[in-house]
């Protein structure tokens, strides 16, 4: 149920951005939405960024 609600909120935000601003503004809203989705996945533990951080430290 949360996925449907999140989809509804994102759809409404994009629709509002298109109605009030235009296509470019809608793309900016979509990028921020994608960033928020990624942060939520990291916080929930579904995406592990530690492997990327450790890999960078080992190369230096």
Image (cartoon, helix red, strand yellow):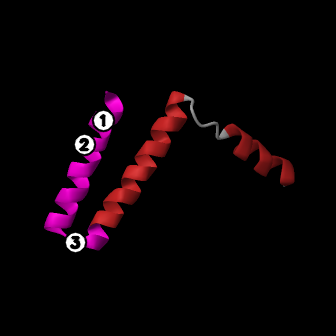
Residue at left 57%, top 32%? 46
Spatial CA distance of label 1 from label 3 is 25 Å
Question: Which of the marked residues, 3 or 2, is nearer the chain's N terminus?
Answer: 2
Q: CA distance from mark 1 to mark 2?
A: 6 Å
Q: Residue at x 51, y 32 (%)?
A: 43
Name which quarter of the figure residue 50 lies in. Answer: top right
> Which residue is disc 3 drawn over?
22
The residue segment tinted magenta is: 1-25
Nearest to the observer: residue 36 or residue 54: 36
Crowd rating for badge 1 (residues with CA inside 10 Å; few <14, some 14–19, many 20+): few
SS state under label 1: helix
Residue 30 horizontal/vertical position (percent): 35, 58
Residue 1: x and y, percent?
Answer: 31, 27
Quick one: quadrant of the C terminus?
A: bottom right
Secondary structure mostly seen in the magenta stretch: helix
Q: Which residue, given by chain and number where applicable, does mark 2 sit on?
A: 8
Task: Pick whichever, 3 or 28, lies toward us.
Answer: 3
Residue lying at the far right of the rendered structure: 59
Q: Is residue 29 left or right of residue 42?
A: left
**Location of mark 1 (residue):** 4
How many residues crowd mark 2 within 10 Å: few (<14), some (14–19), many (20+)? few
């Amino acid at each position: 149920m949360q996925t449907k609600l999140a989809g509804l909120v994102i759809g409404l935000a994009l629709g509002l951005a298109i109605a009030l601003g235009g296509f470019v503004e809608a793309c900016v809203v979509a990028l921020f939405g994608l960033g928020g989705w990624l942060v939520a996945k990291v916080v929930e533990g579904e995406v592990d960024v530690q492997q990327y951080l450790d890999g960078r430290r080992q190369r230096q």
